[in-house]
Amino acid sequence: MKFNYGDTLRIRNELYTILGKIRYIDTHRRIWYKYKLVKHKNNGEFWICWNKKPGVYQFTKLCGKVIPSDMNLVHRGYQMAIGTRGDIDIDIAAVSRYEEYEDDNGTHVLTIEKGAHTVEYSKGVYIEKKYVSLEKNVELTKPILDKMDTVQKMRFIGPIIWFLANLLNNKR
């Protein structure tokens, strides 16, 4: 299922708003979306993406370095960001190597993404589609509205800063 920037999701009775969206393509020519979520209760950041093969959502949170000693490798490959929107700190065309691990029950997941200069670890669970729904007319919290306002300003100011930086650099 595809969602949009600013959509609010109900995931197992908790509300989350999408503040970022990345469109990826991988080495198997599979295209998918990964969404950055902010939880309404505590402003925690999470990620969700649709996992077509088992037909569930992968719901994760960044964590510290983890060794997947008690998990099984289920996917590995390379992915490239081919589109972004919102509060995302990845450049278009950025390539990373990814590895996905599952526990023996197939309920918990660990993802390792190795970019040119970074390594990110994410742990989480698989969530059935019936536990994820799009919510309409939800009142957003002030911290979420502030983040959305900052993203909106950067969409306008960012290109101006880039232009001025290049203009000044060329005059040297």
Image (cartoon, grey):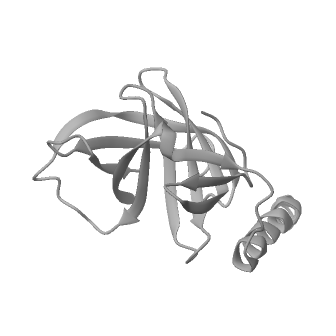
Q: How far across and down, in percent of the image, does residue 99 sit?
A: 30, 42
> Which residue is painted at 77% across and 66% down in the image?
148
- In this rendering, does residue 165 appear at all? no
Q: Which residue is at the front of the view, 68 or 51?
A: 51
Q: Which residue is at the front of the view, 123 or 92?
A: 123
* Image quadrant assignment for residue 16: bottom right
Q: How far across and down, in percent of the image, does residue 135 sit?
A: 70, 51
From the viewer's perspective, is residue 82 above or below residue 126?
Answer: above
Q: Which residue is at the front of the view, 150 or 106?
A: 106
* Image quadrant assignment for residue 43: bottom right
Quadrant, the N terminus: top right
Quadrant, the C terminus: bottom right
> Which residue is painted at 46% across and 36% down in the image?
79
Horizontal relation, residue 102 to residue 147: left or right:
left
> Which residue is painted at 63% across and 53% down in the image?
9
Picture mark count: 0
Q: How far across and down, in percent of the image, does residue 116 sit?
A: 42, 52
Q: Residue furthest top?
A: 29
> Which residue is painted at 67% across and 41% down in the image?
3
Q: How far across and down, in percent of the image, does residue 7 sit?
A: 72, 51
From the viewer's perspective, is residue 146 above or below residue 88?
Answer: below
Horizontal relation, residue 162 to residue 69: left or right:
right
